[in-house]
Image: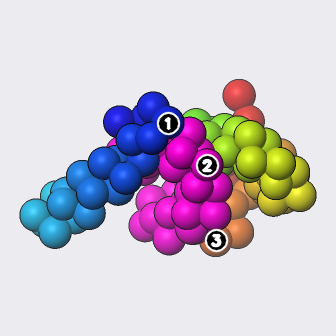
Amino acid sequence: CSRAGEWEDTMSLFARIRTEHFEPDLVTYNTVITALGRGDQWASAIQVMEKMPLSPNTNTYNAAIHTCASAGEWEVGMNLFHQLSSGYNQTKRKEIRPN
């Protein structure tokens, strides 16, 4: 589901998972962010990251930063990098550290 042009399918499946009362895990969210990035949907990818009920991990940040870089949204990407580098995710109140 992560190939370019398949982001619509990924979002459809993601919506179906949630309506069928399954709880998406972090791998699911990371896959959605990656698919959106490959489909040039950087703003949607960031929105998914901001709204997910789980604390993002290094893979989540990596997918989101790569998405921003690919779209030329370097300022957003740098903000995400600074969040990751600081070791603290203010929106989820959890400690994170880069690998």
Q: Position of residue 46 (x, y in %)?
A: 61, 61
Question: Residue at left 78%, top 42%?
Answer: 69
Which callout, 1 or 3, points at the residue further toward the start of the chain?
1
Q: Name the residue type under label 3.
A: Thr
User: Which quarter of the picture shows residue 59?
Assistant: top right
Q: Residue reaching furthest left?
A: 20
In three-dimensional space, the C-alpha distance between marks 2 and 3, rounded to whole angstroms, equals 25 Å
Residue marked by disc 3: 91
Q: Which span is picked out in magenta?
A: 28-57
Residue 98 among magenta residues: no
The Cα atoms of the two marked residues, 1 and 2, are separated by 8 Å
Name the residue tied to disc 2: 40
What is the x, y in percent for residue 94? 61, 59
Whether residue 52 appears in magenta in the rendering, the answer is yes
Quarter of the image that includes the C terminus: top right
Residue found at the very far top of the displayed protein: 99
Q: Which callout, 2 or 3, points to the residue nearer the camera? A: 2
Assess whether mark 2 and mark 1 are in contact (beta carbons under 8 angstroms): yes
Checking the image for residue 4, the label placed there is 1
At numbered mark 1, what does the secondary structure look like: helix, strand or loop?
A: loop
Q: CA distance from mark 1 to mark 3?
A: 29 Å
Q: Are marks 1 and 3 in contact (CB under 8 Å)?
A: no
**Which numbered disc, 1 or 3, marks the residue closer to the eye?**
1
Amino acid type at circle 2 is Asp
- Give, as a three-letter code, the residue at label 1: Ala
Could you say which disc has been placed on residue 48 in the image? none
Which secondary structure, mark 3?
loop
Say if 72 sits above or below 55 in the image. Answer: above
10 Å crowding of disc 1: few (<14), some (14-19), many (20+): some
Q: Verify CB contact (< 8 Å) between mark 2 and mark 3.
A: no
Q: Secondary structure at mark 2?
A: loop
